[in-house]
């Protein structure tokens, strides 16, 4: 299913129906895409304004980066659904003989790791978006500061969705070193994302921008 | 612009371009729509399961309510853009004579109040969604608990977006009693929404559902 070509109402309908995909994972990618669009909008509303001339090239860099990120995110929504379906397929493999049981368990574990990798990729992208949301909050067009804040709030939500999707897969992953590695990286990303989010809120409060 | 009929990629492109609408307000309504879809999905994944039979009629009620809410939200995205454009139009009215100045100021104030009413409507709807997100977290299909949590996180983000959009309009509204009224209601909604959000997080933590 190509998310980018779906109508908003159609995508919502697909999420709402009683099938596990598209679910939180795909929605998280779409929400991150909306967040990237808002940061891109603030950058675009800054470019060409004399008052913000000093930051012109940085804003142009942000527009380009957000365009690329938005493309990637549409793929992630698709990958998330595929990875989930692979897990479901692995669980449905036969388990009549010992060999079949072993093969099934191996396939399940492989599929779970793949399924955990997708929200990780989402979390890393969200980190990149919120870093630029911070730049446009601080140096971008002040008339659009509520849009910069909205972008940051959506990053926070998209990260929490990604985190929930990593955790649900980790529950069933048996490789302890892999689990440890995931948890450490998740924490690192969480610190970075909440660091930016806190600074954005602080900037707005300190400067009375809202 | 009819948001419901827009493709996801097309809506993101429209947000990203250097025009003020669609901006945070319309995005907030779409995000709330995604949240309602996730809560509806969990309810749908609960209906028909023997284990959750006791909650069948409540889940059916939630599906119906979320369907109605999703319809309303698509209209809010449109209303938000229209209200913003009215504010912009009012600012462009002539101000050559004293009468024109008075008339312009009156129109600006009317437009600002209308523009603040739209995110308020969004915030009230978000409160209704997260109440049901709490119900599906507690009593719905536990395989979909990460989707219920995702719905709650999106409610939180949509509320923060609505709040930012109320505050930005309040800055320029001169009617002090109206301002006071808005602030009190905003606080009330905030308490209700964060109350549900906290309980959802607590339920998941206490029961080790994630």
Image (spheres, coloured by chain):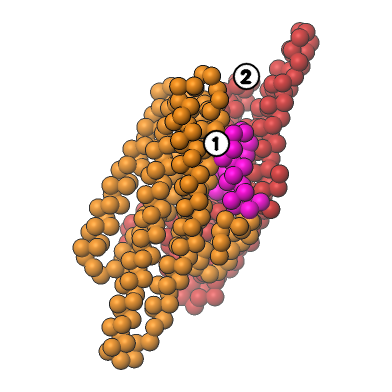
Chain colours: A orange, B red
Looking at the image, is A181 positioned above or below residue B184?
below
Q: Nearer the viewer, residue A67 or B42?
A: A67
Relative to residue B32, is residue B81 drawn left or right? Answer: right
Q: Residues within 10 Å of mark 2 (few under 14, many from 20)?
A: few
Q: Tell me the chain of label 2.
A: B
Secondary structure type for disc 1: helix
Q: Residue B75 at what x, y percent from top left?
A: 69, 46
Q: Residue A172 at what x, y percent from top left?
A: 31, 69
Residue ID for mark 1: A41
**Magenta stretch encompasses residue A94:** no
Q: Nearer the viewer, residue A55 or A39?
A: A55
At 35% from the left and 68% from the top, the residue drawn is: A112
Relative to residue B168, is residue B81 drawn left or right? Answer: right
Residue A12, by quadrant, is: bottom right
Relative to residue B185, is residue A28 drawn left or right? Answer: left
User: Where, quadrant-wise, is the C terminus of chain B in this rendering?
Assistant: bottom left
Residue ID for mark 2: B174
Same chain for marks 2 and 1? no
Residue A88, by quadrant, is: bottom left
Tag 2–tag 1 contact (CB < 8 Å): no
At 61% from the left and 61% from the top, the residue drawn is: A13
Secondary structure type for disc 2: loop
Q: Label the magenta part by its dominant secondary structure.
A: helix
Q: Residues within 10 Å of mark 1 (few under 14, many from 20)?
A: many
**Magenta stretch encompasses residue B31:** yes
């Amino acid at each position: 299913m190509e998310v980018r070509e779906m109508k908003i109402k159609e995508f919502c309908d697909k999420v709402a129906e009683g099938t596990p995909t598209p679910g939180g994972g795909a929605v998280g990618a779409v929400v991150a895409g909306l967040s990237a669009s808002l940061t891109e909008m603030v950058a675009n509303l800054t470019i060409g304004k004399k008052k913000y001339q000093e930051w012109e090239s940085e804003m142009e860099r942000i527009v380009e980066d957000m365009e690329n990120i938005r493309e990637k995110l549409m793929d992630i929504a698709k990958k998330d659904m595929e990875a989930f379906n692979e897990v479901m397929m692995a669980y449905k493999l036969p388990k009549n003989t010992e060999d079949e049981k072993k093969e099934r368990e191996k396939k399940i574990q492989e599929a779970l790791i793949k399924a955990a990798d997708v929200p990780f990729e989402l979390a890393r992208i969200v980190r990149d978006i919120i870093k630029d949301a911070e730049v446009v909050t601080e140096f971008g067009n002040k008339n659009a500061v509520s849009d910069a804040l909205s972008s940051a709030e959506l990053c926070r939500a998209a990260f929490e969705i990604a985190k929930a999707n990593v955790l649900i897969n980790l529950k069933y992953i048996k490789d302890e070193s892999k689990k440890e590695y995931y948890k450490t990286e998740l924490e690192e990303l969480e610190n970075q994302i909440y660091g930016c989010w806190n600074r954005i809120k602080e900037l707005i409060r300190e400067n009375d921008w809202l």
